[in-house]
């Protein structure tokens, strides 16, 4: 069974950097898209970005270049760094596994062209609060 | 790509048939998923590719639609189904989610 376990600081001051790491247990690390998603208190979900095992990344432009996602295949881990946080960054952050679109739809795409799709496994989430 | 959901809130009883609608701002083919989220928990994947049931999800859940309009149907609402439901498009980056539909007890 696939499990995602995350950790990182839960209380930050404005202008600090948020850093979270997610470890993947079980299943293959390659062939999937390792994703960060956040949810402000009482609100909906926002896709932050993803990476594959080769380190190809996609980011949400709404975060204005503040986000970096990195991968460590030797440990089956991936990390999120979000610079210059403000109170509006407060929320629950989840890591999740995105399924390969090529596999889901039998597209036969080469790995370099494959992209993510739906998220089948999620972490428990970490509440990150930004407050002075 | 913007996703809207209707209704935002839905009150229903155990055994009711429940339908939630998700509309996309442009054609997303069938690149749509549905999730269930309970308070304090991570979302759970119910359906992907608009109508394919995720492994382990009860058959009372079903999805339909393509293009810009999609529906999630629960054929007979069970006590454990009271939750918030989100749709998500994966037609194009950045992936986006609908605002959610909260199903509570009438």
Image: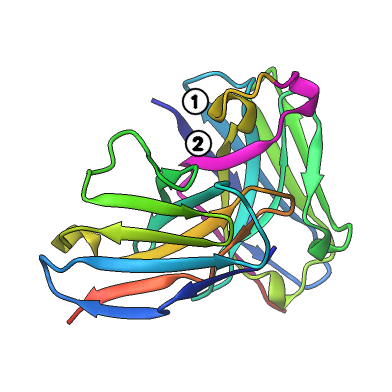
Percent coordinates x, y for residue A20 in the rendering = 66, 47
Q: Tell me the residue at 64%/59% (across/down).
A: B96
Residue A3, horizontal then vertical, whole percent: 45, 32
Q: How far across and down, in percent of the image, does residue A57 sit?
A: 80, 38
Q: Residue at x 28, y 36 (%)?
A: B56
Q: Helix, strand or loop at disc 2?
A: strand
Quarter of the figure with the N terminus of chain B: bottom right
> Can residue A59 be seen by looking at this rendering?
yes
Q: Is residue A98 left or right of residue A42?
A: right
Q: Is residue B99 left or right of residue A73?
A: left
Q: Nearer the viewer, residue A77 or A121?
A: A121
- How is the rendered protein coloured? rainbow
Quarter-of-image position of residue A128: bottom right
Q: Residues within 10 Å of mark 1 (few under 14, many from 20)?
A: some
Q: Which mark is residue A25?
A: 1
Chain under numbered label 1? A
| Distance from Cα at disc 1 to Cα at disc 2 | 6 Å
Residue segment shown in magenta: A109-129
Q: Are marks 1 and 2 on the same chain?
A: yes
| Picture quadrant where residue B71 is located | bottom left
Residue at (65% x, 34% y) in the render: A33
As drawn, the label of residue A4 is 2
Discs 1, 2 touching: Cβ within 8 Å: yes
**In the figure, B83 relative to A103: above or below?**
below
A122 in relation to B75, above or below: above
The residue closer to the viewer here, A117 or A87, is A117
Whether residue B42 is visible: no
């Amino acid at each position: 069974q696939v499990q995602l376990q995350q950790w990182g600081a839960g209380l930050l001051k404005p202008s600090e950097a948020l850093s979270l790491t997610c470890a993947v247990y079980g299943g293959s690390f390659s062939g999937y898209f390792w994703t960060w998603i956040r949810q402000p208190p009482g609100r909906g979900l926002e896709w932050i970005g993803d990476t594959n095992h080769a380190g190809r990344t996609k980011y949400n432009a709404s975060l204005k270049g503040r986000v970096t996602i990195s991968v460590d295949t030797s440990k089956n881990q991936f990390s999120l760094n979000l610079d210059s946080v403000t109170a509006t960054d407060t929320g629950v952050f989840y890591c999740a596994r995105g399924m390969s679109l090529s596999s889901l739809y039998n597209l036969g795409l080469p790995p370099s062209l494959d992209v993510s799709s739906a998220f089948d496994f999620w972490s428990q989430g970490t509440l990150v609060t930004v407050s002075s | 790509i913007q996703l809207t959901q209707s209704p935002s809130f839905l009150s229903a009883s155990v055994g009711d048939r429940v339908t939630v609608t998700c509309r996309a701002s442009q054609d997303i083919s069938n690149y749509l998923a549905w999730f269930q989220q309970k308070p304090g928990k991570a979302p759970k994947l119910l359906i992907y590719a608009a109508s394919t049931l995720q492994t382990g999800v009860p058959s009372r859940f079903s999805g339909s639609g393509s293009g810009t309009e999609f529906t999630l149907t629960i054929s007979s609402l069970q006590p454990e189904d009271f939750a918030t439901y989100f749709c998500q498009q994966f037609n194009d980056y950045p992936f986006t989610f609908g605002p959610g539909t909260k199903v509570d007890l009438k």
